[in-house]
Amino acid sequence: MATTRRELLGAGASAALGLFPWSNTTPVFAQPSPAAGTATSQAWDDGDLAIDAFHLKKLADEQKPFGANDVRVWQEKTGLSNNEAAALIGVSLSTWNGYKAGSPIPKPVAMLCRAITRDPIMMQAHLRPRVAGRPRSKAS
């Protein structure tokens, strides 16, 4: 089994390696290490990839499951109504309510909710708040 980046990519492959190609596999960083809490960084055998404890924790947090309770907490933190949250995320109101009731939440939705939590300016750039009342008729 390949254990180093060179073995995974092959001899003539580019030196750059992203984590994206393995996104559909079991999360690597969400698994507790046998020496959890005793080290400040993680290094692989060939020494070409190292990560500090802060970023390792961030990666693990991103890979945690995102469930109905997380959706409710996210909506409460952002202060959005059901309609606003559904519109911002890009799903129907019934789909949004399904997420809150326990339907499986797709990874892109979880990633977007977490990104909005980290960067509220992203929410402000894309949120189109509803105006109360009926739409005004267009003047002829």
Image (spheres, rainbow, N blue to C red):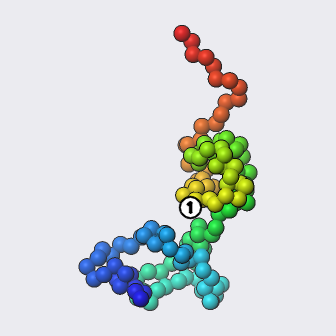
The location of residue 12, given as percent across then percent down, is: 25, 79
Q: Quadrant of residue 45?
A: bottom left
Q: Quadrant of residue 54?
A: bottom right
Left or right of residue 18: residue 67 = right
The location of residue 112, given as percent across then percent down, is: 57, 55
* Viewport quadrant of the C terminus: top right
Residue drawn at the location 59% of the way across and 73% of the way down: 60
Residue drawn at the location 74% of the way across and 51% of the way down: 76
Q: Secondary structure at mark 1?
A: helix
Task: Say if residue 58 shows up in the picture.
Answer: no
Task: Say if residue 9 shows up in the picture.
Answer: yes
Instruction: Give neighbour class at mark 1: few <14, some 14-19, many 20+ (Cα, 10 Å).
Output: some
Q: Is residue 71 above or below residue 81?
A: below
Q: Is residue 14 above or below residue 40?
A: above
Q: Quadrant of residue 18?
A: bottom left
**Extreme residue toward the top, this view:** 140
Task: Report the front residue among 104 and 3.
Answer: 104
Q: Is residue 4 above or below residue 106?
A: below
* Viewport quadrant of the N terminus: bottom left
Q: Which residue is mark 1?
A: 107
**Extreme residue toward the left, this view:** 12
Task: Report the front residue among 108 and 14.
Answer: 108
Looking at the rendered structure, the kind of residue marked 1 is Lys
Residue drawn at the location 57% of the way across and 12% of the way down: 139
Question: How many numbered discs?
Answer: 1
The location of residue 128, given as percent across then percent down, is: 60, 37
Residue drawn at the location 67% of the way across and 41% of the way down: 83
